[in-house]
Amino acid sequence: MVVSLTKPIKLHSMRHDMCELTPEQCAWKSQKWLDWYHADRDYAQSTVYFMVAMIGFFGICNALSRGGIKHRKVLAAWRWASYRNYRARSWYSPPAGIVGLGLAGAVFVAGLLLAAQPYYWPNTKVPKLSYGNSPPIATRAGWMAVALLPFVIAFASKWNFVTFITGVSHEKLQVFHRWTSWAMYVLALVHTFPFIVFHIWKGDMMMQYKTTIWYWSGIAALLPQTWLTILSLGPVRNRYYEFFKSMHYVMTILFVVFFFLHCNFRLSSWDYFIATAVVYGLSLFASWGKTYLQPSHTAVLESLGERMVRVTVPTSMKWRPAQHVFLRFTTMGAHSATSHPFTICSLPAPTSSKEPGAGPSELKFYIRPHGGLTGRLGTVAEGRPGSAMPVTLEGPYGGLTKDLGKFERVLVVAGGSGASLIVPVLESVGGRVPVHVIWCVKTSAALSWPSADFLRLSSATTTVSVYITGGQLNTEKNIAAMSATPGVDVNATGCRPDLAALIRTEAAAVKSMALAACGPASLLFDVQNAAAGLQLRILAGTAGPLEEVYLHAEHFAW
């Protein structure tokens, strides 16, 4: 079996076609979209142009939004596409605008792949006629897959050029990482099977496998790519997240190495690996800078009961409301090899010593233990209350992109431990405008951990409506303590409130309203679609005085 690259190794292979057919046949074989020696320019570069055009378009939109979009109907249409979701049983779609982008990408890929014919060369055995050993459809699929590689890596990176250009935080790009990965996988299959069909017809399949680098390396690349793609499906990824995350890095390395060997410097294929290395290298250095240029940090763990852990990290870091950081607990055994994202539930201390609350800043995180790292944190917090351990911080990332205090009214909707978003929003608004908090919990036991923060942040402009949706009132003292907090109303309804109706009511008498939501997918679905419905009313001119509705949504999982 040949395991080495073709000698001599170069950056690019030659483009000269030593065609031995008739002049007419050579001319037909060498026309645009069929010429093997220029397929990288026809298909890989076209794919890059499409991706760059999409990113550039949203970069322009980002630049315009920074200056403020003045036309309220244009803004409403844009936000409708950004908020409107769809559901099929337990599956929730991305927003309509993202679905539209995905469809546009699918049409582009299908069109570029299938438009030119033939898909196979009209080779014959008797009389012997050979236009080439690479079926045209396999060639173009391979080049399109190669071109997507830098973008797949960019969409997966925390610090990346797409975020820099478009202003879209890395966690919101994960959907594009998954979709481009699937496109790359489908193209890899379309690249693979025509070769199998052709060489079985030709009768030299095993000979090709044993004597050339392309065939065994292609299979070696396809196996980890299959693993990466299938195990990234939501139900599998969420159920086995710790295993998925650790193996994702291993399989990615194997895939890229074998893919690199498979390309074997044909034409300009290695240029795309160089671009991938640059994209990932810059992301890695930026992440390291955000982590290791900071002073050392120590995390203090406290068990708050009712399956809730508070992690406090004194720091000199600065951050915005609703941002998140990646925590790596360096003494957690196997878990110290990975970092995990957590939303910050506090704001930095004021810089001026004359302001209330001035002093050292503290990052606060409220974590509900499940399996893996969070389960281990819960065990440590219960067994050794107040225990301190070293931790590294990477970030901050994401967060609110607008000052909610500039809207006439703010509505915060949270479900369960999504209440971690409530405190930084209330702190950032600081009583400048009326704030209504809607917090849905399954049982009254969940009311214990944030009650002190609600009491501290309660004001004449803040009202809190708590809905106990599970009907299990197992800790009456929590209800009494929460109800005693000024501006807090506890409703033991046994079901979730009609969020759409509540949101419409809040928006009825104001010109502008900001929504902030964090919780399970079903809650975010209701909030996002209610916000999208208000955008349609603005477009139709039936929203009354309402001119603007802004939504910031935080997901439990990516």
Image (spheres, rainbow, N blue to C red):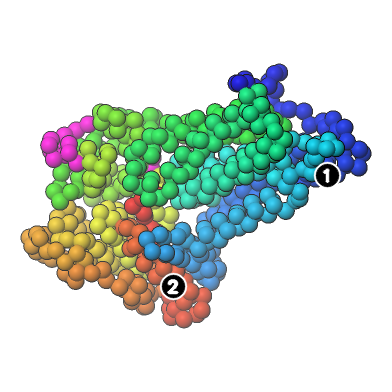
Secondary structure of residue under mark 1: loop
Query: Which amino acid type is marked by label 1?
Result: Gln
Q: Name the residue under label 1.
A: 31
Quadrant of the image containing the N terminus: top right
Q: Nearer the viewer, mark 1 or mark 2?
A: 1
Above-or-below relation of 543 to 55? below
Task: Confirm or deny contact between disc 1 and disc 2 (CB under 8 A).
Answer: no
* Residue located at (40% from left, 45% from top): 397
Relative side of 477 to 243, left or right: left
Q: What residue occupies the far left of the structure in this picture?
A: 477
Q: Distance between the residues labelled 1 and 2?
A: 51 Å
Q: Which residue extends farthest right? A: 23
Decide whether residue 381 is among the magenta residues: yes
Q: How many marks?
A: 2
Would you say 518 lies left or right of 223 here?
left
Q: What stretch is highlighted in magenta?
A: 378-396
Tell me the residue that label 2 is attached to: 533
- Is 279 left or right of 510, judged from the image as shown? right
Mark 1 or 2, nearer chain start: 1
